[in-house]
Image: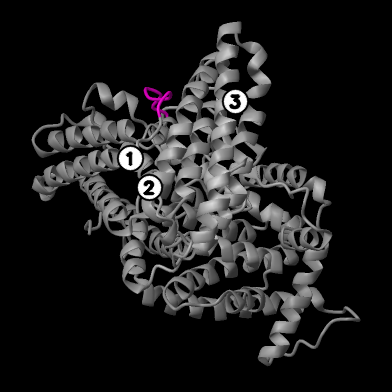
């Protein structure tokens, strides 16, 4: 479960003028350092859109919708030079003279500029990660066709313009990538995903060809034919050159992992403290699961023994038996998406009835996950950019592939049973990502909407799952509560798994055993998570780290606000600051020092 990790926000309005966007901008006349920071931020936002047109489209800046990112050596050099210039200007500003809101944004922007330079010059993912090119190619088309920000014929024209450029883009990818540095698992994943680009065209573009005039239709037909040839050529290169020569190590190692983790989290927590906290949380959560298992299994003739003080084997057996009851109650393979829609409707009604938070008025839609994005996460939330007002948020669910065996399908459905699907709806949509990202896009700080902090966003969604269970969603059903705790345990073990694989060298066999035994995951889920953990890094800790930070912030609010604390007040307040690192949202909420 995830949200699409892309830069989100508004760019186009800022390109025209260096407008203020701090929280109290409307009440202050910017001057001095604040005016300088506003101009610098606008400059960065504009430069980022020009250097990454695909991200700009996703963010709601549609000035460059006919262009693609330039990942050639010259394009990367231009991006690095821009980051260095802006970082030098930012470092020269007197941070202590900025408003508090701009101090927060300055911390976020500095981290991003340094992260961009580190990714290009130290990590060098452009040379060994072929999946970044596949994602960009798919997003280039999906982002102009998925949402109705312009008339259909206009968006088709933009899609065609990008289709015409994609053959050269794929060719550039082949020139950039060094097969000997590419990890085999990355190459194998690309081999499965590459053809998804043509299916995306077939699903989103070709059906609308009849809406075009003859000349435009002829251009589309030509672009489709040429791109199909380019995708086939790319597939031949993948199978003939990349796969046989992919010898890279997908494990980052301690140095690169720690550096990436610090940038990605922008948190005070480091690898060792995360590991210690996660291991302690796993013990506590399993104990809570055992207590629920005893409740669920009580009176059942086939129930295992459940003493007050169980042995490790007794605890494992009881929790597994209770989870099996939930796993057995799953939809048919063809009903997964309908189950997701039902779960979303139920969660929406509950949040409204409990008045847990102010809800956005923009719609959310359950959709089939596009093929080019399948294979990493089961579901995600794709929110519109801040400039694309009133457009739908997509809650994308991955259907079960037709070629899956009955055994693999059953494993998937047991993991994503009816209660688990209801829980996913709370994570991805209500009151999770959909609600949080809508609040973030309403924040006056455009910069924070663009540079959303992963742990804040994912942590909120995990926090939201627990709130729903605590408040009695689904009538307080103990099996539902058990499923939520299982999901929580998965987020905890995600944080352990990520560093165990990339730093400690955990094997696939040990990783699957850890996920299946410690976290009670089905074999199919564990196998998919192994691939996800192998082709990504420093993202799986978002869920645990972020939820820990959100709960700590809520406890502080309860302490400081006393009798004036309510869930709705707290939720609306913490989300009013956008999606900054949680430590900065906490500082803004309580007027604490900004560190």
**Secondary structure at numbered mark 2:** helix
C-alpha separation, residue under disc 1 versus residue under disc 3: 25 Å
Residue 321 magenta-drawn? no
Residue at 36%, 60% in the rendered image: 265
**Secondary structure at numbered mark 1:** loop
Residue at 47%, 75% in the rendered image: 500
Name the residue nearer the viewer: 378 or 393: 378
| Residue identified by numbered label 2 | 176
**What x and y, as percent, mark residue 594?**
22, 56
Name the residue nearer the viewer: 369 or 357: 369
Based on the displayed image, in which of its 4 quarters is residue 20 positioned?
top left
Picture layout, residue 100 above or below residue 328: above
> Residue most toward the right?
301
| Residue identified by numbered label 3 | 225
| Residue identified by numbered label 1 | 72
Name the residue nearer the viewer: 40 or 488: 40
Q: Earlier in the sequence, mark 2 or mark 1?
A: 1
Based on the displayed image, in which of its 4 quarters is residue 251 positioned?
bottom left
Residue at 65%, 23% in the rendered image: 206
Pointer 2 with pointer 1, Cβ within 8 A: yes
Image quadrant holding the C terminus, namely: bottom left
In this orientation, does residue 308 appear? no
Residue span colored magenta: 60-67
Q: Earlier in the sequence, mark 1 or mark 3?
A: 1
Tell whether 178 sits left or right of 371. left
Image quadrant holding the N terminus, namely: bottom right
Task: Please tell me how crowded label 2 is: few (under 14), some (14-19), or many (20+) other residues with Cα within 10 Å.
Answer: some
C-alpha separation, residue under disc 2 versus residue under disc 1: 7 Å
């Amino acid at each position: 479960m995830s949200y699409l990790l892309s830069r989100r926000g508004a760019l186009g309005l800022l390109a025209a003028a260096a407008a203020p966007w701090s929280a109290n901008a409307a009440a202050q006349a910017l001057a001095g350092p604040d005016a300088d920071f506003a101009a610098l931020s606008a400059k960065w936002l504009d430069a980022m859109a020009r250097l990454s047109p695909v991200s700009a489209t996703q963010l709601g800046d549609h000035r460059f919708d006919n262009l693609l990112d330039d990942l050639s050596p010259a394009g990367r050099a231009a991006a690095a030079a821009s980051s260095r210039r802006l970082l030098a200007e930012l470092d020269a500003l007197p941070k202590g003279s900025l408003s508090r809101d701009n101090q927060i944004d300055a911390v976020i922007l500095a981290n991003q500029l340094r992260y961009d330079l580190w990714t290009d010059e130290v990590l060098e993912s452009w040379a060994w990660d072929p999946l970044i090119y596949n994602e960009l190619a798919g997003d280039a088309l999906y982002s102009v066709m998925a949402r109705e920000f312009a008339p259909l014929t206009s968006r088709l024209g933009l899609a065609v313009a990008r289709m015409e450029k994609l053959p050269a883009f794929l060719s550039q990818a082949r020139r950039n990538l060094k097969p000997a540095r590419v990890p085999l698992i990355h190459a194998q994943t690309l081999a499965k995903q590459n053809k998804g680009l043509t299916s995306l065209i077939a699903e989103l573009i070709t059906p609308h060809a009849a809406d075009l005039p003859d000349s435009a239709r002829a251009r589309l037909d030509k672009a489709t034919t040429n791109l199909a040839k380019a995708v086939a050529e790319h597939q031949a290169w993948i199978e003939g050159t990349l796969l046989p020569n992919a010898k890279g190590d997908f494990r980052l190692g301690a140095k690169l992992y720690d550096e990436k983790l610090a940038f990605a989290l922008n948190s005070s927590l480091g690898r060792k403290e995360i590991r210690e906290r996660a291991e302690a949380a796993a013990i506590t959560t399993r104990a809570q699961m055992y207590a629920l298992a005893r409740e669920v299994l009580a009176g059942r003739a086939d129930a295992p023994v459940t003493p007050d003080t169980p042995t490790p084997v007794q605890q494992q057996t009881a929790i597994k038996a209770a989870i099996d009851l939930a796993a057995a109650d799953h939809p048919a393979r063809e009903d997964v998406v309908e189950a997701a829609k039902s779960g979303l409707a139920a969660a929406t009604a509950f949040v409204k009835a409990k008045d847990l938070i102010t809800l956005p008025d923009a719609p959310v839609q359950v959709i089939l996950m596009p093929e080019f994005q399948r294979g990493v996460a089961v579901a995600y939330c794709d929110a519109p950019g801040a400039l694309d007002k009133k457009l739908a948020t997509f809650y994308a669910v991955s259907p079960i592939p037709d070629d899956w065996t009955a055994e693999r399908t059953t494993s998937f459905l047991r993991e994503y049973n009816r209660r688990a699907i209801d829980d996913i709806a709370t994570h991805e949509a209500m009151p999770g990502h959909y609600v949080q990202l809508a609040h973030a896009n309403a924040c006056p700080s455009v910069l924070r909407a663009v540079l959303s902090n992963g742990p804040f966003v994912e942590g909120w969604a995990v926090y939201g799952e627990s709130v729903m269970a605590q408040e009695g969603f689904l009538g307080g059903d103990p099996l539902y509560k058990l499923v939520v705790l299982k999901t929580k345990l998965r987020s905890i073990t995600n944080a352990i798994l990520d560093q165990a694989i990339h730093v400690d060298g955990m094997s696939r066999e040990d990783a699957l055993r850890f996920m299946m035994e410690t976290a009670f995951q089905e074999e199919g889920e564990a196998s998919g998570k192994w691939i996800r953990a192998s082709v990504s890094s420093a993202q799986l800790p978002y869920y645990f780290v972020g939820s820990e930070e959100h709960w700590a912030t809520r406890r502080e609010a309860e302490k400081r606000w006393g009798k004036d604390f309510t869930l709705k007040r707290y939720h609306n307040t913490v989300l009013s600051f956008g999606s900054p690192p949680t430590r900065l949202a906490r500082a803004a909420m309580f007027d604490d020092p900004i560190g």
